[in-house]
Amino acid sequence: MAVSPEQLSALVTYCTDFARTMLEDAGDFYPFGATLTNDGKLASVGGHNGEERPNPQEIYALLGGSFAADAAAGKLSAAALAANVNIPAEYSPSAPDGLRVHLEASGFSRFIYVPYRITEKGFLKKKRVAVFGESFAVAIAPHFFRANGG
């Protein structure tokens, strides 16, 4: 099934919205994702390795492996894997902190970076506000939908 630009955008929007919620509620987030099934349904995906405070890289690898296996088995049309990262300085981001969404479908693989800053608003009761900057995409080699397996 060919994935439309609107469907890919919906995956990125889901990741951006959930990251904003987590940043404003907790100031951070563990890797998470979203998938698009072959019948066009978007599903949110979290990972857990059994530890109370897991290493975020382990959760990222766990989810990435799951997405690659599901893509190879023909269960997915697209996948998005979100992580809280330091954006490489070579990209001259508007802020060093960022949401990175690894977005893939067959024949399409990008890192979507969204720089952000967290500010506090309110006088008596402080509230975190995540302010997102302009997103940008970087082409990468496929990981979930490899030409020979997905």
Image (cartoon, rainbow, N blue to C red):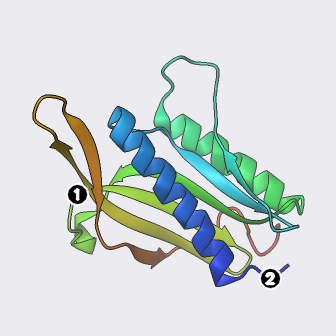
Residue 149, placed above or below residue 68: below
Residue 34, placed above or below residue 89: above
Please state if 47 lies on the left or on the right of 98 as rendered.
right
Numbered badge on residue 96 = 1
Looking at the rendered image, the quarter that the N terminus falls into is bottom right
Q: Residues within 10 Å of mark 2 (few under 14, many from 20)?
A: few
C-alpha separation, residue under disc 2 versus residue under disc 1: 34 Å
At horizontal 64% and vertical 26% (from top left) the residue drawn is 49
Residue 4 appears in the figure? yes
Camera-side residue of 46 and 25:
25
Q: Which kind of residue does numbered mark 1 sit on?
A: Pro
Camera-side residue of 133 and 90:
133
Q: Which kind of residue does numbered mark 2 sit on?
A: Ala
At horizontal 15% and vertical 39% (from top left) the residue drawn is 122
Residue 95, placed above or below residue 25: below
Numbered badge on residue 63 = none
Looking at the rendered image, the quarter that the C terminus falls into is bottom right
Secondary element at tag 1: loop
Q: Residues within 10 Å of mark 1 (few under 14, many from 20)?
A: some
At horizontal 37% and vertical 64% (from top left) the residue drawn is 114
Q: Identify the residue position indicated by label 2 in the image.
A: 2
Q: How many marks?
A: 2
Camera-side residue of 45 and 128:
128
- Residue 45 location, x and y as percent? 67, 45
Residue 120 falls in image quadrant: top left
- Residue 38 location, x and y as percent? 86, 67
At horizontal 27% and vertical 47% (from top left) the residue drawn is 129
